[in-house]
Image (cartoon, rainbow, N blue to C red):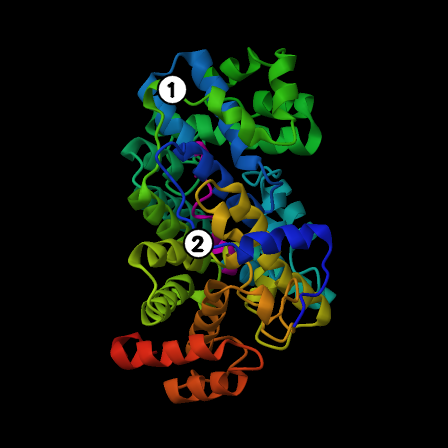
Amino acid sequence: MGMRRLPIEEENMLQAIASPTTLHDTTSVNLADVISALSYALDITEGQPEGHASRTCLIAMRIAETIGLSISDRSALFYGALLKDAGCSSNAAKVCSLFAADDRSIKQSFKVTDWTSKTESLKYLFRHAAPGRSPLGRATTIAALALNQSAGKELMLTRCSRGADIANKLGFSSETTAAIRALDEHWDGHGEPFGLRGEQIPLLGRIMGLAQTVEVYFTTYGLYPAITMAEERSGKWFDPDLVHALLSNSDDHEFWSMLDSDNPRELLARFEPEETRLFVNEDRLEAIADGFADVIDAKSPWTCRHSHGVADATVGILRVLGHHESEIRHWRLAALLHDIGKLGVSNMILDKPGRLTPEEFSAMQQHVDHTRRILRLVPCFSGFADVAAAHHEKLDGSGYSLGLTADELTTEARVLCVADIFDALSANRPYRTRQLTLDEVLKIMATEAGPKICPIAFEALRTHLEREPSSSP
């Protein structure tokens, strides 16, 4: 059977999918390149333009240089700024439920609102809460939010605490984790989640809080509004000394023009302290993949442990098929990160109990394109980006998003598809009334083995489950 002709961009993707497995040499890969690329996934989760975390990091590092921060603290600040939103997915479902709106839109607008002002908060609610509901439904939602004084604190506590936990899991310092935990505290004590005041707030957290807000205003409105906002909130949201340090750089047109570039990630190398520059190894890469799998799975209560479940099934199938352990280790990373693109999908879609509309299904399908684009940015992960993004492709071409067929899919892509379907069918989902039994799951999959999913990979899954009954749902 001949390969169908594809547009040149898709042909380039297939070259990577069809290529033999090669394990990336990690000995000279800068950790900052890996983390900054993955931070793009956190940006889209927060409804921010890609590069938000990188630009925040650049602003934070410029402030750090101005105040003469020590090299060790600058290193801790550097990674804290890139990972500041690591906990952002953990409250996405709750935000979506409370506001009855797209969580990404709610979060994006939230960052340009002075929510410590009751007037601004009410305006924010009227603009964004329950946009698809009737006037009465909107009024009910807005009233419930206005009366629920603890909701914001709980959301911030979840986000900041979870982000700090992820940074700790990735092996970063206590200074980095403390800064992430204190990201949304305010100088006057009216921040969240702990209401810390003044120098009770870790210095790195104060810098990051200022830098992220300036970045959002700079990207949304421009330099002058960003500087004006910082001045107006000096002594309220922000440490006055840090605002003064920021203002001393306001005339550095070269810096702000550089910040406005299309690829801020390329600029990070000149701001990371060379003396403390970190590099990755296989163990560090596994920790990163495991940590970001936690971020991915936290996006929806229905996908809890999904990424790890797919990884476990992938490993089991590949072992049955006789793959070498070094290859299996490599493809486990792909399985852990295969759904990273779902961070860019609204929880209105991910958690919907009924059938998706054609428009919603189209938006859902885009998650594999997000996965492909993000992983291709990441050194060490780019080699499996296209395979990871092929987990919804089917042998008969009925899958998405490229509509690949049997002769266009490698063994690993086929295995990942089988593992993904197995874990998805085995788990609870909002559109099912009950959890399926193992026999029911395998019966459903058996009907697709051959025409749609790889029969060899499916039989290997059966063998794996017989050998490891604890892997069964």
Q: Which residue is mark 1?
A: 274
Q: Residue at x 32, y 72 (%)?
A: 320
* Viewer-closest of 251 and 405: 405
Q: Position of residue 28 (x, y in %)?
A: 38, 31
Q: Is residue 148 visible?
A: no
What's the amino acid at mark 1?
Glu
Q: Position of residue 192 (x, y in %)?
A: 43, 41
> Mark 2, residues whose alpha carbon is within 10 Å: few (<14), some, or many (≥20)?
some
Q: Is residue 69 visible?
A: yes
Q: Secondary structure beneath disc 2?
A: loop
Q: Residue at x 58, y 20 (%)?
A: 231
Q: Which residue is mark 2?
A: 21
What's the amino acid at mark 2?
Thr
The residue at the far front in this view is 1
Q: Position of residue 126 (x, y in %)?
A: 68, 52
Q: Is residue 143 magenta?
A: no
Residue 18 falls left or right of residue 472: right
- Which stretch is magenta? 81-93
What is the chief secondary structure element of the magenta stretch? Answer: helix
Quarter holding residue 232: top right
Q: Is residue 398 above or below residue 261?
A: below
Q: Residue at x 48, y 18 (%)?
A: 63
* Viewer-closest of 59 and 141: 59
Q: Residue at x 65, y 27 (%)?
A: 261
